[in-house]
Structures are given as structure tokens and as C-alpha cells.
Amino acid sequence: MATNKSVDIFSSASLAVEYVDALLPENPLQEPFKNAWVYMLDNYTKFQIATWGSLIVHEAIYFLFSLPGFLFQFIPYMRKYKIQKDKPETFEGQWKCLKGLLFNHFFIQLPMICGTYYFTEFFNIPYDWERMPRWYMILARCLGCAVIEDTWHYFLHRLLHHKRIYKYIHKIHHEFQAPFGIEAEYAHPLETIILGTGFFIGIVLLCDHVILLWAWVTVRLLETIDVHSGYYIPINPLNFIPFYTGSRHHDFHHMNFIGNYASTFTWWDKIFGTDIQYHAYIEKTKKLGKKTE
């Protein structure tokens, strides 16, 4: 009975979303996107699409999303949004980060990306336009991937902070006490593999089209670069997502080194009480702010 009720609920929700989707105006980008996708399929092999296409998407999205945060340091008006105002970005630090980042991208992540084609072949993941899932199904599966990744990240990230192993692996990521956008994936190669595994678990369980690989890469990079940006902008649309960690949550982790281990959502920190120091800090900051007004 419970299973039937669950199926009915999901079917009703799906019908409701389809009805809303039918009322929305036609997406003007749909046809150009379709033409580009078909052109890609006609001119490149599946291996090229899965490997080099995924690398290009990752690099383009990573540095595109990092660009605003990089530019903020040169805009005096944005200084009021910087979380740790006493720790400005430095050229030396950013250059060191960029070199380490590129090493990770091309010598650690690229070999992992090379397995994408074989993954899609083994599980018969389609590439064609005809089986391209609707936007809301892609969004729903990205949400599922985010929940899975966040769970993996919380427990493995917390383990990496264990005093016996912290200095060997995770300490590299914490070289920058005040994070900035491109620092999101600056880490020890082992950490890249350990925490990066959480990214692939959702793909293995939920992927029904190669487009989900790129959609999930985009969502994950948007989130991790945002929380590492070092800036809290109240009107940021991501801050309105329920249970979203946000930049202040993760910035405190870099400042405090203990607590706030989750990557995307706040519930695991809430359940295990690893956000107690963070909330105490926020309350203290509010009180100090009132006294200075």
C-alpha cells in the first residue's frame, strides 16, 4: 500500500510539473541548443564528447563562475560584502592556488574524466537528442546527486579533519584561511579523489543521459565556488534555497577549522551538532553589530 501511495504522489507531482511546463512560453534557446547538440553528435565520437567535452565544460564553467569573485577584489564597493575583511586576497596566494589547481585538473581529474566514456558504454547511457530528458527531470536528478554528494562529503570531510590524518591531506586545502573562488578545488590529490567520489555516486545511481553529467558538473561547481567565494551577497539567489549552506557557513569552516563540514546543505551539521560554534559566532557578531550602531 505504501509503495502504491508513493507512486501516486510522484505521478501526481510529475503531471503537475508537466502542466506548469505546458503553460510556460516556449524557450527561445531550445532550437539553437538542439541544433548545436545534433551538430556535436554528427561531428564527434562518443569518446570525444564524453572525455574532451566533459573537460571543456568543467574548465569553462569553473573559471566562468570564479570570475565574479576574482573581480570583486578590485571593486571597492564589494568590500562590504567580504566576510573576512581583514584577510584580503593576495596575488601570491592566488597564483599559488592557480598552479595547484591546474595540476589537479589535468593530472588528477582528467584521468578520472577519461573513464566517462566507458561508464556511459557500460551502462548504455544515451547521447541522442530524442532521449534527452525534460528540464525538470534533469533538475530533479541534480538535486538527488546533490543530496548524495552532500552526505558523502560531510562524513568523509569530517574524517579528513581527524587529527591523525589532517596534516597529511586536508591541510593543503586549508592553507587559505580566507577562501576565494578558484580555491574551491585546490586540494591534495588524494582529497580530490576521496571527496570527488561523492560526485560520481549520484551519477552511477541516477544518470539516464549524458546531459546529466554536464548539468550536475555545472550545479556542483556553482555551489562549491559560491561557498568558497569569500563574499556574502544577500540577494544571491542561492541563499534562498532551503537548507543551503552558503558562503558564510563554509567561510567559518576555513576560519575556525572545526565544524560546518557539509558541502551543500546544513542538515548533517545540524543533526550532529557540528554547527554549534558557527551559530554562537553568528550570535556574537550580531550583538557586536548592535553595540556599534
Image: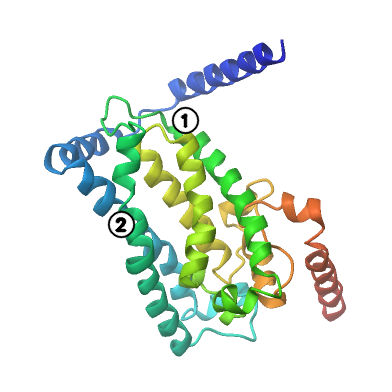
Residue drawn where x is 61% and y is 85% of the image: 87
Mark toward the start of the polypeptide (1 vs 2): 2
Quadrant of the image occupied by residue 166: bottom right
Q: Which part of the image, by quadrant, shows the C terminus?
A: bottom right
Question: What distance separates the C-alpha of mark 1 from that of mark 2?
Answer: 24 Å
Secondary structure at numbered mark 2: helix
Residue 221: x, y in percent? Answer: 46, 57
Q: Which part of the image, by quadrant, shows the N terminus?
A: top right
Q: In this view, does 19 lie above or below 245?
A: above
Which residue is more in the foreground, 240 or 56? Answer: 56
Q: Name the residue type under label 2.
A: Leu
> Pointer 2: what residue?
55
Q: Name the residue type under label 1.
A: Met
> Pointer 1: what residue?
137
Q: Is residue 261 above or below residue 230?
A: above
Residue 25: x, y in percent? Answer: 39, 28
Which label sits in the foreground, 1 or 2? 2
Mark 2 closeness class: few <14, some 14–19, many ≥20 residues within 10 Å:
some
Quadrant of the image occupied by residue 168: bottom right
Residue 284: x, y in percent? Answer: 85, 73
